[in-house]
Amino acid sequence: MDVDKHRSLLLILARELASNLATPMFVVDVHGVLVFYNEAAEKLLGQSFATTGPIGPDQWGGTMFQPEDLDGNPITVNDLPLVDTMRERRPEHARFRITGLDGVKRTIEATSFPLFARVDDLAGAVSVFWEEIG
Amino acid sequence: MKARVWGCRGSLPAPGPDTVRYGGNTSCVELRVDEDIVIVLDAGSGMRALGRELTAGPARVIHVLLTHLHMDHLQGLAFFLPFWAPDVELHIWGPPSPSYGLSERVAAYVSPPLFPVHLSDVPSRPIFHDVPDEPWMIGSALVAGYPVVHQGPTMGFRLTADGRTLAYLPDHEPSLGVNLRQLEPDWMSGYRVAEGADVLLHDAQYSDHEYESRVGWGHSTIDHAVAFADAAQAGHLVMFHHDPAHSDAELESLLDQARSLGDGGCPPSLAAEGMTIELGSAGVAMDSPSPAETDAPVPD
């Protein structure tokens, strides 16, 4: 996966925040490539970032986590909150199910928001997840 | 390309017998690439003496590159003689901000109650520019400015001419929340500024012990500076932004520490007022004022 060699400071800061955060978090760049997820997300997804490396949106939004709504209908990549955030450049929130790489199905809530370096300079986005327990 | 350090102290001017060898003036570096254009990195208190020298010469086009607007990087501007010369073409470049223009932010300092004259009444009528996203030319120097980790909008500058590159990161905390020695370089703040630079002027304000109570203040330890310079594969590390509480002897002790930390690829030295750095086809030549020139006066 090709990623920018020189990253926006906002992505660097987002990764620093994520790597120190106990809450699962994704960081995507301006092209929608998943350029980092933290240890808490690794537990949720069942695979380490060191193993996967950067992942394109078609993979992380589709085959990788098999997202579905609460009725069990598949969610397309374009309907995921993080993809919506990148497209619409606004915060999004959703509740849905994923199947982690460990095969476990989980209900999660995800909140995503865009990272603007200036008023209209989109550097990427982040998404924070909560697993619904019980 | 020739650089001359006019101030390398951090945070606050620190004149006195303990700081004579490395100087007490805050950040200001003069850079010459073209005969008729002067590039000035930051407007700390060292800028006052630079201005005095420039008024004696022919330079009529001056570009001041501000890394950020903390006082120690701005306080010399209003005492820079060309600032008051109507026949000087003075350009001031600084970090963009989403809220206020650069001239409005500089005017917060150059206006009452902090200063007696309004910026709009300054005879040179400086031309303000936000640092652009892409590199640009000043004379025959290619200049690039990129945001880096500090407190508030802050840039690092990368200047290339004659096939040589000088990187300037006087206020920088790339280690915040990460271990620089375990981090891939492309995830480091400032890497884009310093990558492969022949000379890197970098924040080296704190000892490890001092940093413990100053995490997040936007500065680096000696260890951080060395690790960053090694990761960037810079040719020379010039330790910059000396803490105002550090005496000449303490700085030399920190230099010894820096020499023991590096991988040997990037020899460290201490920035000093009067230091010159020449970058050209023959390589890099650095010259600091000799101790005899800078010895502290002996008290009566």
Image: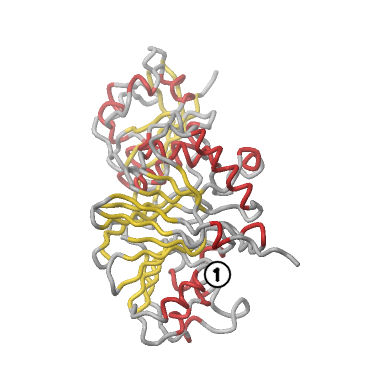
Instruction: Report in which chain the residue with disc 1 lies.
Output: B
Considering depth in this image, is B104 or B72 the residue closer to the camera? B72
User: Can you say whether B233 is above or below A103 in the image?
Assistant: below
Colouring method of the image: secondary structure
Q: How many marks?
A: 1
Within 10 angstroms of label 1, few (less than 14), some, or many (20 or more) residues?
many
Please determine whether, in this image, residue A43 is positioned above or below residue A4.
Answer: above
In the structure shown, which secondary structural element does the residue marked by tag 1 occupy? loop
**Image height check: is B83 above or below B74?**
below
Q: Which image quadrant is residue B109 in?
A: bottom right
Examine the image and state in which quarter residue A36 appears.
top left
Q: Image quadrant for the N terminus of chain A?
A: top left
- Pinpoint residue A114: horizontal percent, then vertical percent: 39, 45
Residue found 48% across the figure and 31% down from its top: A19
Q: In which quarter of the image is the C terminus of chain A?
A: top right
Residue beneath label 1, please?
Answer: B75
Left or right: B35, with A115 as reference point: left
Q: Nearer the viewer, residue A91 or B238?
A: B238
Report x, y in % for residue B264.
41, 34
What residue is at 24 percent from the left and 64 percent from the top?
A: B140
Q: In this view, does B277 lie above or below B125?
A: above
Q: In the image, is B38 to the left or to the right of B261?
A: left
Residue B131 position within the rendered picture, expressed as x and y whole percent measured from the top left:
36, 62
- Pick the residue in front: A109 or B244: B244
Q: Which amino acid does label 1 sit on?
A: Gln
Percent position (x, y) of residue B153?
Answer: 47, 56
Kindly give the residue lying farthest to the right in the view shown.
Answer: B300
